[in-house]
Image (cartoon, grey):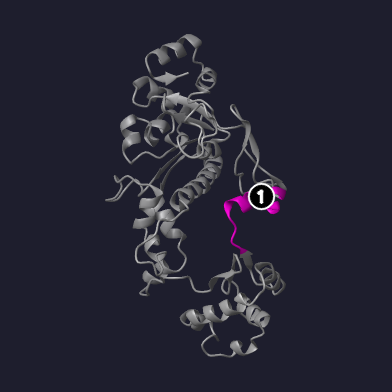
Amino acid sequence: MIKIERPGEGDETRRGYLQLDPARDDQATYFVRVNAGKLSVAVDLGHRDGREIVRNLARGADVAIENFVPGVAARLGIDHPSLAAVRPDIVSCSISGFGQTGPLRDLQAFAHIIHAISGLMHLERQGDPSPRVSYLQAADVLAGTHAFGMILAALFRRARTGQGAYLDVSMLEALVAAEDVSFGAVLNGGEAVSGQRAGMIIQRIGDRHVVTTTVGAPQLWPRLIAAMGRPELASDPRFATRIARREHWPEIRVIVGEWLAGFPDADKALETLAAARVPAAPVLSPEEVVAHPHLADRGFFPSVPHAARGSVRVTGTPVHVDGRPIGPARGAPHHVGEHTRAVLSELGYSAARLEALAARGAIAL
């Protein structure tokens, strides 16, 4: 995979927490993690020669992805029609905050902005006096995941028909589509379900927190009341149906919370819930997650080469193929334009031409 970076400063995510090279300010762990396995080609898209290079790269590419504000790629001459002119069966994907059409298309978008305008920030407010900032940049992650799936589908269609595709992925729509209760209700005359999600419990036991759930499968509630030794709750009209349990969730929350609080420690509560086949887990810190033997067994934190550190650990790909984890084939590009010379040489650019392009500021070597 080839990553086009701006000559000089490169991708802005290079500068952030935590810097892996004390002599540099462009080796943030986030950049290294999400760019492991990619080749960095430094091209100035504002330069006519730079734009021509991108079109030449497209000639041999299967997929082109961009996340400019809508309209920018067209002004640069690297939008889907421009790339399809040199590679008719190319699959192009645009990822933007609000999509390529509509009255909000020109707004700048970051995950925090999308979280607010999607309604999710409102739904997560619960009893707080003001909305909260979500820690997970879910709009970014979900938009990328949808793009990945649709790109594979487009490539499959191309293999069958020879037809390329243009994909328009909206961060806003990706986040709204991920909500599983309120939008379906509101679209059909119901009310949004805000506040704490019914059926989901967080309970402090000693110095730890345990989570469990009473919803998601038909047998969870019967298993839980059996584990609590409260068979009479099964015939209580307040809790007899799923809808009734939703309406009387605050009462259930007190009953289950008091039972969990009675355990001597979190481990005993988790052991009892597991024996009853009720889903439960401890609330872990990132340090505990990184040290967890389960993820070590799955090979989820692979090491990749790094010029300054020798190697660094990154989060892996959450998929095993044929029984094995898959990870990046190489580390992230250490320097902006680290692979410009090698990649463009493969396209037939001579050393003299590359030096001339670099002298004109179209590329960085």
Q: Circle 1 sits in a helix, a strand or a loop, which is it?
A: loop
Estimate the x, y position of residue 353 in percent, counting from the top left.
45, 11
Estimate the x, y position of residue 210 in percent, counting from the top left.
60, 67
* Magenta region, residue range: 282-297
* Front one among 268 and 359: 268
**332 relative to 155, above or below:** above
Residue at 52 percent of width and 45 percent of height:
148
Estimate the x, y position of residue 229 in percent, counting from the top left.
67, 84
Q: Which quadrant is the N terminus positioned in? A: top right
96 in magenta: no
Q: Which residue is mark 1?
A: 291
**322 relative to 115, above or below:** above
Residue 300 seen in the current view: yes
Estimate the x, y position of residue 78 in percent, counting from the top left.
38, 31
Residue at 46 percent of width and 81 percent of height:
247
Q: Amino acid at mark 1?
A: Ala
296 in magenta: yes
Secondary structure mainly formed by the magenta segment? helix
